[in-house]
Amino acid sequence: MSHENPLKAAVDKLTEPFRENGPAEGVPGAPSSGPVTVEEPTEPHGPLPPKPDQTGPETVSPTGQPTGADQARVAQSGAYLTTAQGTRLYDTDHSLKAGPRGPVLLQDHHLREKIMHFDHERIPERVVHARGAGAHGVFQSYGTAAGVTKAAFLAADAETPVFVRFSTVLGSRGSADTVRDTRGFATKFYTEEGVFDLVGNNIPVFFIQDAIKFPDVIHAGKPHPDREIPQAQSAHDTFWDFVSLHTEAQHHAMWNMSDRGIPRSYRTMEGFGVHTFRLVNAEGATTLVKFHWKPKLGVHSQVWEEAQITGGVDPDFHRRDLADAIEAGAYPQWELGIQTFPDTPEQTFEGIDLLDPTKIVPEELAPVRPIGLLTLNRNPSNFFAETEQVAFHVGHLVPGIDVTDDPLLAGRLFSYLDTQITRLAGPNFNQIPINRPHAPVNDMLRDGFHQQAVHTGVAPYKPNSLDGGCPFFAGADTGAFVEVPVELPAARKVREAPASFADHFSQARLFWLSMTPVEREHIVAAYTFELGKCYEQAVKERQLLALANIDPELCAQVAAGLGLPAPEATQPLADVRPSPALSQVGGEWPADGRIVGIVTDGTADADDVRALRRAVLDAGMVPLVVAPAGGKLGDGADAITVQRTFATARSIEFDALVLAGTPAPGADAQGARDAKAGEPGQGGAAVDPRLAMLVSEAFRHAKAIGGWAGAETVLAAASVPTGAPGVILADSGEAVLSGLTPLLAKHRVWDRFPAAL
């Protein structure tokens, strides 16, 4: 089967509404699936259907049986407002009172029910990974893993529905998307053999080697308990106090300080299973494995200033980007790949301990072999019911996939079940629709909070005869999950770690040496910023000691930024070979779904602007028209709809900007109304200061910029040299786009600002 990105259908879906209905339609983000009128509708009708990009969980019973029910049958129904028991209501705006000005009556059952439910709408947020976004999709297996695992969903041409949740780790549900943090990448496979959850991160290593330290690292990273600040960030004393003392965290900290800590989007983010797992094939042979998700669009990040601006301008940036891409038909895709290793008693590979979750195996030593394609193609229809209530667990396994003795993994096997009982109010969280398996369930588990299955029979125990012996045991030949019978060495019961776990710096050095010069500059800046936010000098000095054991140049640069002397290393520097696969810079990737801002006021050639917009769509990207004010530019069917104005646009949303001439300043370019308009650019009144800011930000964030028909005036106002790398001037919009597209394939114009390191 083909492994190529099926972009053509997605582009056709994206382009068709523009071509048939004009430019206003087809741009993602419309909140309703139906037309909206100025007047409040009064003609009774049932609930509107979901938008075409939305869907709910598959309609299966609490015990995993397909019901065949339309998804609309499990949602709200009917044209009239009712109580929770279905009684129709004539009013929900007024409490029942003794006269219009009298006291509210205790008998108001509708008030009591409405307020009671509102008071209990929220459930405890996740302790970690509280801030998340999710989507439905499908996983298509290539069959290339069939030789190492008997898992049915990895057989040739198998298709499995999935639900994926992306998240940050430290922040609360109300925090921003673009903070510097590790990201969760959790995938629920609804396989025919039961649910398999691959619960990973966008960083392949973790801060700790043993789960008993998990409360420590999270307590250190969370806001300080006395002031409950700072929110959703690691730039504070308690985090760096822990990391500098607990040096096994240095490798993960290095990844976090790199561009990996601030992804451009979930669509351009890798995922990793972190741990080493064990695969079992049909003959019973075992193989050790690490799982990798590789985005088809490449791995890309924001720059630090861009991430900071985004947190204020659009704290929902990542979840909006994911939902809009799916709605537009630019479906995000990742290949699932595996690194495989012989299952030897030592469980090591090339001297690397495979049970140490703070270590990677470089891809140059063990290539990642693609085994399937994940496509996210449907947005949830209800965030709470699906994204918030989805419950993952690393112990949700299927035949052919087993765990290893990684001590961090062992603790996770306990923790995930334990936390669901608190969050989801009991042991029956698996019966919530988003969590229901798509395979038959006969578990003999009974009762408990929120039991939704109506069980029959009288003998929920084994052995029994009163229920005819049902349920029966399965054998390996009938799909039973059988743990691998691993030989355990004779050992003392101790609280210790193997000697190989004591190496805390070699792989952090490996990562640093694998970065390109521009990526090293970003790492230096990240360490300098984060440590600069710490109050205690001792914490800064101690972390510099750790950096000295990673690389002296890194340590010296950070120390200079902090105004501190650079210490000497306390142990020999590790002799490691760089891994080019760890760098995000240097390759070329598809530009699918990239956002191109077209800046115009309608005075430039409208046909040229329309042609540019069509060319952007045909290239699989999304055009957003930016103008001094909203509405439409021009008249009639060919009028150009404006998606952003100078007041609402900010550079962080766009991957590239194209300037159609020199748009006139907006009527609202007043400092009292919009502070961004308070200072005119070098072009004076000829260029709106907010447009000059938009272009200036895009330029210093190394984004491609183009223009025609006198765009040089805007560039001058923004202090952008026309001859700078990544600045394309031509005689038409389409000609500009042809010059910008190769730059977008590389994500950023990194050579615009040469690196010092």
Image (tube, rainbow, N blue to C red):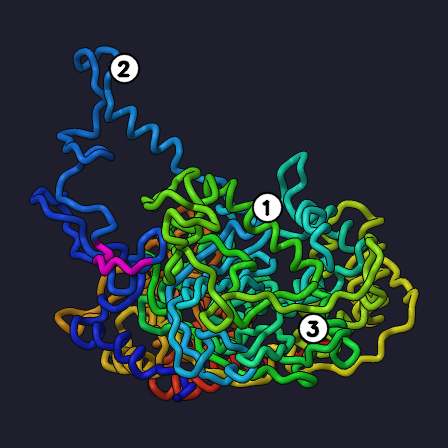
Where is residue 24 drawn, in percent x and y?
23, 66
Between residues 589 and 381, which one lies in front from this camera angle? Answer: 381
Specify the amino acid type for callout 1.
Answer: Gln
Which part of the image, by quadrant, shows the C terminus? bottom right
Specify the amino acid type for callout 3.
Answer: Ile
- 738 lies left or right of 108: right
Q: Of the numbered discs in the image, which one, if any, rests on residue 360? A: 3
Q: Indicate the secondary structure of the residue bearing disc 2.
A: loop
Q: Which residue is mark 2?
A: 106
Specify few, some or many for label 2: CA neighbours under 10 Å numbering under 14, 14-19, or 20 or more: few
Where is residue 557 drawn, in percent x and y?
79, 67
Q: Residue at x 47, y 86 (%)?
A: 742
Magenta part of the chain: 65-72
Can you see residue 405? Answer: yes
Which part of the image, by quadrant, shows the N terminus? bottom left
Residue 338 magenta: no
Specify the amino acid type for callout 2.
Answer: Leu
- Magenta residues: mostly which secondary structure? loop
Q: Indicate the secondary structure of the residue bearing disc 3.
A: loop
Q: Indicate the secondary structure of the residue bearing disc 1.
A: loop
- 407 lies left or right of 43: right
Front of the two marks 1 and 2 = 2
Q: CA distance from mark 3 to mark 1?
A: 30 Å
Q: Which residue is mark 1?
A: 231
State if disc 2 and disc 3 touch (CB < 8 Å): no
Where is residue 221 drawn, in percent x and y?
67, 49
Q: Earlier in the sequence, mark 3 or mark 1?
A: 1
State if disc 1 and disc 3 touch (CB < 8 Å): no
In which quarter of the view is residue 562 placed?
A: bottom right
